[in-house]
Amino acid sequence: MRIGFIGLGIMGKPMAKNLLASGHELVVRDNNPSTLAELTALGAVEAPTAKAVAEQVELVLTMLPNSPQVTEVVLGADGILEGAHPGLSYIDMSSIAPLVSREVADALAANGIPMLDAPVSGGEPKAIDGTLSIMVGGPQDLFDRYADVLGVMGASVVRVGEIGAGNIAKLANQIVVAVNIAAVSEALVFAQKAGVDPDAVFAAIRGGLAGSTVMEAKAPMMLDHNFTPGFRIMLHIKDLKNALETGLSVGAPVPLTTSMLEMMTALKADGHELEDHSGLVQYYEKLANLELSRSEVVA
């Protein structure tokens, strides 16, 4: 299949590579020349605008930072809508506000273009190995048509409901992930402050009820103080803001989301916004006046 892919960042680039490796033809667009060169060296075709991408393909995928970028790329000048043609479909894999997904879908539907919102979870490692969790909203027939394409990038591809439901599921995911990272951070700093090796505590509790995918992925990064981004704090702040705004709009209480947003905003103020969200442990380290480390007893 000839597919357009717009947005080749930390997540989008490996996702696009997996599509190429599976035999799909790609027409790509990004603002980073080196990334474009990397993809074209693998066989992708570069296009100068989103419009030009849409004109050449059956399906356009986007993986963009937030709602304004999606709106601009789809509905703005030289956008996907301007390159629309019969048979074109659109899947937005960005994590954005659900109401914006619905607004974009309505504008496209008025021009005969069907849309799915299909945000992902799993960070860069799962984007690289093609095992992302993909949460999808939109028409069942469109989901059925492109489920195999999404399956190239994800180990779990689940249709949650109609358009916008994918991003509702993603925001729920981001709430759970943020609270889990905070809990792991709090527990490990607590252990070290109490004079017990946090690495040993991690080994002791990981196999019990406290164990989680988040703990397995993020506790080693915290213990090594390795905050190389798989998913940046600034992007998690964006997701939590969207969750908070959505919660307020529908009357859903989100007190833990509010707390997580405050913690991550404090880290942003300290200059950590480009680090991995496992860097949330630094919020607790600052309060406890210690730096987490392996095999260190501090009592």
Image: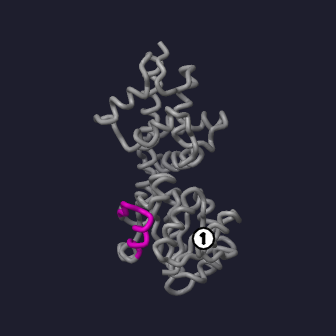
Relative to 46, is 117 on the left or the right? Answer: left
Nearer to us in this view, 271 or 40? 40
| Coordinates of residue 230 in the picture (x, y in percent) | 54, 49
Q: Secondary structure at mark 1?
A: helix
Amino acid under label 1?
Val
Q: At 70% from the left edge and 75% from the top edge, which residue is drawn?
A: 48
Q: How many marks?
A: 1
Do we see residue 75 in this rendering? Answer: no
Do we see residue 236 in this rendering? Answer: yes
| Coordinates of residue 195 in the picture (x, y in percent) | 44, 16
> Is most of the magenta stretch helix, strand or loop?
helix
| Coordinates of residue 119 in the picture (x, y in percent) | 47, 60
Height in image: 131 above or below 205? below
Height in image: 228 above or below 20? above
Q: At 53% from the left edge and 67% from the top edge, which residue is drawn?
A: 17
Residue 150 magenta-highlighted? yes
| Coordinates of residue 101 in the picture (x, y in percent) | 51, 63
Q: At 64% from the left edge and 70% from the top edge, which residue is drawn?
A: 29
Identify the residue under disc 1. Answer: 74
Q: At 53% from the left edge and 57% from the top edge, which residue is drawn?
A: 96
Residue 23 magenta-highlighted? no
Render colour scheme: one colour
Q: Which residues, given as a range, are shown in magenta?
A: 146-158
Nearer to us in this view, 125 or 49? 125
Nearer to us in this view, 260 or 216? 216
Are there few (<14), some (14-19), or many (20+) residues within 10 Å of tag 1? many
- Name the residue at the left extreme: 208
Q: Quadrant of residue 63?
A: bottom right
- Name the residue at the top extreme: 299
Q: Quadrant of residue 151?
A: bottom left
